[in-house]
Amino acid sequence: MSVYAVTIPCFAQMLRSLTTLLIKGEERAQALGFDAQHLLDVRLAPDMHTLAAPWRRKPCVG
């Protein structure tokens, strides 16, 4: 079994789950009447990154 066959289906499922959670969070924010962007920018602790931080940084491409 290749590394691709073992990892990619798992990563794809995690991304689908993340997409579903983000959509539900956006819908909930709209239902409660606040900006959904706040969910991406909030920190649970002062020393934590935000939820969106990994995608806002420049990728390390060599």
Image (cartoon, grey):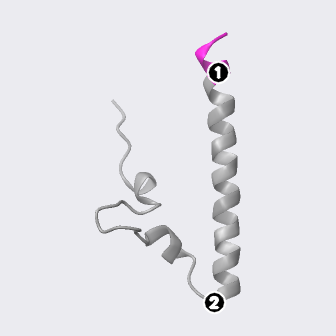
Residue at the image position 62 percent from the left and 36 percent from the top? 11
Residue that carries the numbered disc 2 in the rendered image: 33
Q: Which mark is residue 6?
A: 1
Circles 2 and 1: CB atoms closer than 8 Å: no
Q: Kindly state the secondary structure of the residue where label 2 is placed.
A: loop
Residue 50 falls inside the magenta stretch: no
Which portion, as a residue range, is magenta? 1-6
Residue at the image position 64 percent from the left and 29 percent from the top? 8
Marks 2 and 1, how far apart at CA: 42 Å
x and y, in percent, of residue 22 in the image? 63, 63
- Is 8 rendered above or below residue 53? above
Label 1 environment density (alpha carbons within 10 Å; few <14, some 14–19, many ≥20): few
Residue at the image position 68 percent from the left and 77 percent from the top? 28
Label 2 environment density (alpha carbons within 10 Å; few <14, some 14–19, many ≥20): few
x and y, in percent, of residue 53 in the image? 40, 58
> Which amino acid type corresponds to the residue marked 1 in the rendered image?
Val
- Is 51 rendered above or below residue 8? below
Can you tell which quarter of the image residue 61 is in?
Answer: top left
